[in-house]
Image (spheres, grey):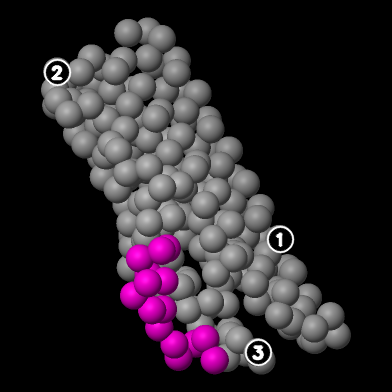
Amino acid sequence: MDLDACLDILKARHGCDHGDHEEHANHQATPCAVANVKQTLAHDLHLESSVPDDLYATTTRGLYDAFMRCQSKRVEIYARFETGFVELMFKDEFAVFSQEITKHFAAVSAEINRIEATLRARDATTLATLIRKVQVQEKEKLLLTSALLLERMRSKQTRDDDVSASIYETSIRSMEGTHTKIIEAINELLVEMQYEVAEL
């Protein structure tokens, strides 16, 4: 995952703070608040690995199953990402939340990369290539989700009679359309993987 790109998008949140929320832009979360955010995410998302310790001793089917567990964990992280964004977007804890949530995404991605590398090492190239394609789509999905959440927040801060309101609405619709296409592409790849594994 491109952590820097994702964090840059989330940091743009400060650029659209205004009104009653301006005071948060220049504040940092207290050590206690930081620890609370980290502990809450660790509890909600679970830190244990989704892949076997010895990947090379795992069957190809076992590697596929491990990949699917990683995908399920990604779904959980996305759900927590969206709820946390809404809950913390105007709070001092937002910065550490953004950093921690992207670390969780990166950890899952790293595990999947290990699975892919193991599959390539045993010449299961078709399955490995499908996983690589999923990874590329997931990277785009994460960046787009970050941008979409930010755009929705900006839209909510805009008055109905503001000229920029319609611009935000158009932008959001466009992003949502692209987001849907990415999800459809990922699902198609997952179906292809099912067929590939069924032939093992």
- Callout 2 amino acid: Ala
Which of pointers 2 and 3 indicates the residue nearer the eye? 3
* Residue 57 marker: 2
- Callout 1 amino acid: Arg
Few, some or many C-alpha atoms within 10 Å of disc 3 (few <14, some 14-19, many ≥20)? Answer: few
Check disc 3 and report the residue beneath it. 20
Assign a secondary structure to mark 2.
helix
Which of pointers 3 and 1 indicates the residue nearer the eye? 3
For the residues marked 2 and 3, what is the alpha-carbon distance in whole angstroms?
57 Å
Q: Which residues are magenta?
A: 23-37
- At horizontal 74% and vertical 69% (from top left) the residue drawn is 169
Assign a secondary structure to mark 1.
helix
| Main SS class of the magenta portion in the image | helix
Indicate yes or no whether the magenta region holds residue 105.
no
- Callout 3 amino acid: Asp
Q: Is residue 25 visible?
A: yes
Name, please, the residue furthest toward the right: 161
Q: Considering depth in this image, is 85 or 118 the residue closer to the camera?
A: 85
Chain-order first, disc 3 or disc 1: 3
Chain-order first, disc 2 or disc 1: 2
- In the picture provided, is 171 more to the left or to the right than 142? right
Check disc 1 and report the residue beneath it. 173
Q: Quadrant of residue 152?
A: bottom right
Assign a secondary structure to mark 3.
helix
